[in-house]
Amino acid sequence: CSGVDMSQWREQFSVFRKRPEWAYFDNAASCQVPDPVLDTMLEYQRELHANVHRGSYQQSQHATALFESWRAQIAGFIGASADTLIFTRGTTESMNVLAESLLRPRLKAGDNVVVTLSEHHANWLPWQRVCEQVGAEFRVAGLNAAGQVEDIFAHVDSRTRLVALNHASNVMGVINPVAEICAKLRQQGVLSVVDAAQSAAQLNLDVSQLQCDALAFSGHKLYGPTGIGALYVRADVLDTMPPYQVGGGMVDMVYADHSTFHRGVQGFEAGTPNLVGAAGLAAAVEFIQGCRAKGSSAYLRALFGQLKDTIERFEWLTCLPHSDGVVPVLSVHNPDIHPRDLAVFLDQDGVSARAGRHCAQPLINKLTANGCLRFSLGVHSNAADIQRLAEGLEAWQREHKGQRQHKGQREQS
Ligand code: PMP
């Protein structure tokens, strides 16, 4: 077997030990969780748990120290300091925090906000809603043929308050030049927000190099649990933001006539945090760093090459723009085949891919007539998965020969 045939990480996932044949191609939606991450979560919950930032007894103090060490570890993963990293439920909640606490106080009627056409709804709807409510303009920058945002500065003017864009598209895996864009936005005094939900698992992120004002990612897209994510906000920007939610844990003093709140990240973590989730996210970061040190990036890129070569053998499928495998996501479509039909067909033989509009309706509506089928790889993926997919596509082809001829005739006419 060549290096690409065998995943050295597959055995670490209980689900693949139980179902060795399962070809799971939906990592862009949510990754499976490997044993070291689950073990850390279980150990915390079983033996180390207590509420944090509250108790004076030793177990609580220890849990607080652990929680803060996870924050520092996750912040380090993106080149940030611990006092700039807020725990959230995920990228969706992070963008809502920013829309309410960063954008709303600054936005006036007649101002504008810019996003790109390839945004996930999580990085579209929160901004759009605040714009509608305030009477500001919501602008959408288009894409070039390669799927990257095109000439975003054509949409930025003196009334632009904020630009929000994805680092990598969840549909295409195409990477936007965010460092270049954010640096220029900073020079112009425009706030920049980066959606790193699809890039955090694949790219070495460094917020000081990216020069963004805020960046968000989700635990479950980097082999961690659901319900936990991280939001980085540049320190001087964070200082200007009012709390998003209020409640226990984030207050300083509470009186009948007024209350005061903690400054910094703790002011954004009302209520008891998702401690076991934070344990899992820190362990997931460690897992990814371990994978990278053992060559997972090159492995995934090579495997992506195999995936692409395989799919290109089926001329009835058209690939959307994609990366060179750095973000291993490949979406395909055919106007005569509903992607859900193909997804259900493939799944009968244990090939699980995601069909639909992928929470990116504006992009999909522009690129395809009926949605697309997305294949996304994880470190457990291997050549056997791709072989299984090839067999599934061949079986579909045999069963739907007439339909394909119909399409060929239609194209000729
Ligand atoms: N942005 C992108 C690019 C995504 O891929 C996703 C998840 N599909 C999100 C935002 C939302 O993340 P979550 O569902 O974890 O909040």
Image (tube, rainbow, N blue to C red):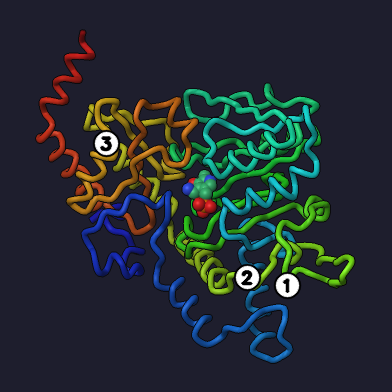
* Callouts 2 and 1 close, C-beta under 8 Å: yes
Which dot marks residue 311? Answer: 3
Residue farthest to the bottom, as pictured: 57
How many angstroms separate mark 3 from mark 1 (CA)? 51 Å
Q: Is residue 190 above or below residue 57?
A: above
- Point out residue 251 in the picture as x, y percentages from the top left corner: 79, 70
- Point out residue 64 in the picture as x, y percentages from the top left corner: 67, 79
Q: Secondary structure at mark 3?
A: helix
Q: Secondary structure at mark 1?
A: loop
Name the residue tied to disc 1: 249
Q: Residues within 10 Å of mark 2 (few under 14, many from 20)?
A: some
* Callouts 2 and 3 close, C-beta under 8 Å: no
Front one among 303 and 254: 254
* Callouts 3 and 1 close, C-beta under 8 Å: no
The reply to whether residue 395 is in sight is yes
- Which badge, 3 or 1, comes first in the chain's sequence? 1
Left or right: 122 as drawn, with respect to 354: right
- Point out residue 368 in the picture as x, y percentages from the top left corner: 38, 27
Which dot marks residue 273? Answer: 2
Amino acid under label 1? Gly
- Which badge, 2 or 3, comes first in the chain's sequence? 2
Left or right: 73 as drawn, with respect to 308: right
